Image (cartoon, rainbow, N blue to C red):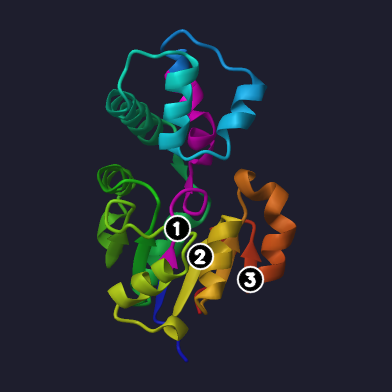
Amino acid sequence: MMIKGYIVDMDGTILDSMFIWDNIVAMLLQKKGITIDNKLKNTLAPLSIDDALKYIKEKYQLSDTIFELQNKLSKILEYEYLNKAVLKPGAKDFIKNCAAAKKKLCLLTANGRDLTIKILEKNNLLHYFDNIITCDDTKLTKQNSTIYQFAAQSLDLSVNECIVIEDALHAIYSAKKAGFIVWAVADNSNIHDWHKIKEISNASFKNMKSITLS
């Protein structure tokens, strides 16, 4: 069946931004004059942002409410994304080539909607996407393969008509489980998983410069 569309991840795939998430809680604490060590970094690494905030609030007896910490974190995130995160090599050309070839595009990201829109506008990419699905739009996560089926339906396409492009191992697993062709993009954040990623994805790429549309 002919490929008519692509479901594309943002962080680590088209945007070099995973370093922000690796350090975001540390940046929040630094603003409070607290320096964290590697032991705390390792403790926070597997936690969700909300769980990490609950952990540091208790550990350091922070007077801020979780809501206040979330707001402060959001401001740091926005600054970091809009001032330090850049598109990965070949990402913009790939997106423009999709539009030129009349391929449908869905951006599927675990990021928030407002920030995602600002990032796309900053990089002059917003108008290329037929649909944008963020964590604000669905309770589904990329741990759940259903989210990829949801994304395909948003493009009015079947599973066989889409290719998913991701960088994270868990996301690639989910998309494969849903029956999609999956292309993997290398990132500093997936170095340790790259061997496994190459095994389970249909194709793998150093960056998007080397991708040819199907």
Instruction: Give residue 58's quadrant in the image.
Output: top left
Hey, what amino acid is under mark 2? Ile
Q: Which residue carries the number 2 mark? A: 165
Say which label, 2 or 1, has the lower sequence index. Answer: 1
Q: Where is residue 148 shown, x and y percent of the image?
A: 42, 69
Hey, what amino acid is under mark 1? Asp
Q: In the rendering, which numbered label is found on residue 203? A: 3
Tag 2 near tag 1, CB within 8 Å: yes
Please report the residue visible at 48 percent of the width from the left and 41 percent of the height from the top: 17
Please report the residue visible at 47 percent of the width from the left and 22 percent of the height from the top: 56
Give the magenta-colored segment's residue range. Answer: 7-28
Q: Where is residue 193 shown, x and y percent of the image?
A: 69, 53
Q: Where is residue 51 shown, x and y percent of the image?
A: 45, 35
Q: Which residue carries the number 1 mark? A: 9
Say which label, 3 or 2, has the lower sequence index. Answer: 2
Q: CA distance from mark 2 to mark 1?
A: 6 Å
Hey, what amino acid is under mark 3? Ala
